[in-house]
Image (tube, helix red, strand yellow):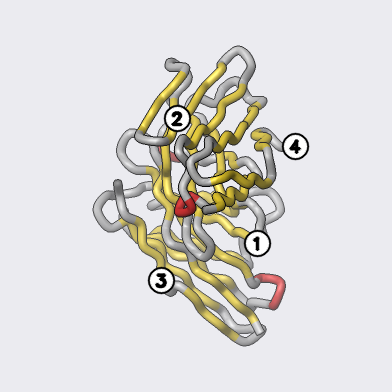
Amino acid sequence: QQQVKQSPQSLIVQKGGISIINCAYENTAFDYFPWYQQFPGKGPALLIAIRPDVSEKKEGRFTISFNKSAKQFSLHIMDSQPGDSATYFCAASIEEGSGGSNYKLTFGKGTLLTVNP
Amino acid sequence: GAVVSQHPSRVICKSGTSVKIECRSLDFQATTMFWYRQFPKQSLMLMATSNEGSKATYEQGVEKDKFLINHASLTLSTLTVTSAHPEDSSFYICSAPGAGGPQYFGPGTRLTVL
């Protein structure tokens, strides 16, 4: 049972374009939604995260849009650059009232982004 | 952000030997750490939750006697792959929750079992 569904599996974008990756979740108890960027042979790095009390969060070229009623959230990368080429993972966890042991993340399957120069 | 380190970054061993991987939170304390395994071009699969001062909690299907976890202090967790076999070859990654909830990941350990 996959609790976080991510699409597309791969994405090719031209330099300067917008990259959009979508995720949908099933567990309404999830209350923390991070996005991670992973380069080959490296650990995932936290990119940006959102909580369900807001519908959008922007940090530089990266924006998360969150739709609580649809149980969906997406990552938008504006002005995509070749250096953004990596695998992106969405994730979800339950934090409220859970304590540290329930910070465990449920990951999507990942999106391989390629930004052509 | 917070820093999590892993050691070694890569290890090659013979089948049947045991391998220990260390995960350290460098600038914060972590009563909980997580261990993941990642196969090529796949997502991260949670193996177990490491708890300081108590036993680790393993995910379904993960052999606790094969993957020994010890959370020795508030900044160190170790994963020992016992009697490693080629099918255990993978990328092992640890993480720890920082202040406010975000999880920080280590750089990973590439294990190759010959």
Quadrant the N terminus of chain A occupies: top right
Q: Residues within 10 Å of mark 3 (few under 14, many from 20)?
A: some
Looking at the rendered image, the disc whose residue lies closer to the viewer, 1 or 4, is 1
Whole-number angstrom distance, CA of label 2 to CA of label 4 = 28 Å
Q: Chain of mark 2?
A: A
For badge 2, the amino acid type reads Thr
Which badge, 2 or 4, is on the more N-terminal residue? 4
Report the disc number at residue A1.
4
**Mark 2 or 4, which is nearer the eye?**
2
- Residue drawn at 66 percent across, 85 percent down: B114
Task: Name the residue that disc number 1 marks.
Answer: B39
* Numbered tag placed on residue A63 in the rendering: 2
The type of residue carrying mark 4 is Gln
Instruction: Measure the alpha-carbon separation of dots 2 and 1.
Output: 29 Å
- Per the image, the residue denoted by label 3 is B7
Q: Residues within 10 Å of mark 1 (few under 14, many from 20)?
A: few
Residue at the right extreme, as displayed: A1
Do the residues marked 1 and 4 share a common chain? no
User: In the rendered image, which quarter is residue B39 located in?
Assistant: bottom right
Q: Position of residue B22 (x, y in %)?
A: 42, 67
Where residue B84 appears, x then y in whole percent?
64, 77
Between marks 3 and 1, how big is the CA–CA gap? Answer: 19 Å
- Residue A80, percent across and down? 48, 42
Residue flagged by tag 1: what amino acid is it? Answer: Phe
Decide: marks 2, 1 in contact (CB < 8 A)? Answer: no
Q: In this rendering, do the residues under marks 2 and 1 share a single chain?
A: no
* Whether label 2 touches label 4, CB < 8 Å: no
Viewer-nearest of discs 3 and 1: 1
Q: Nearer the viewer, residue A104 or B5?
A: B5
Residue B58 appears in the figure: no
Q: How many marks?
A: 4
Q: Single out the residue that lies furthest toward the left.
A: B27
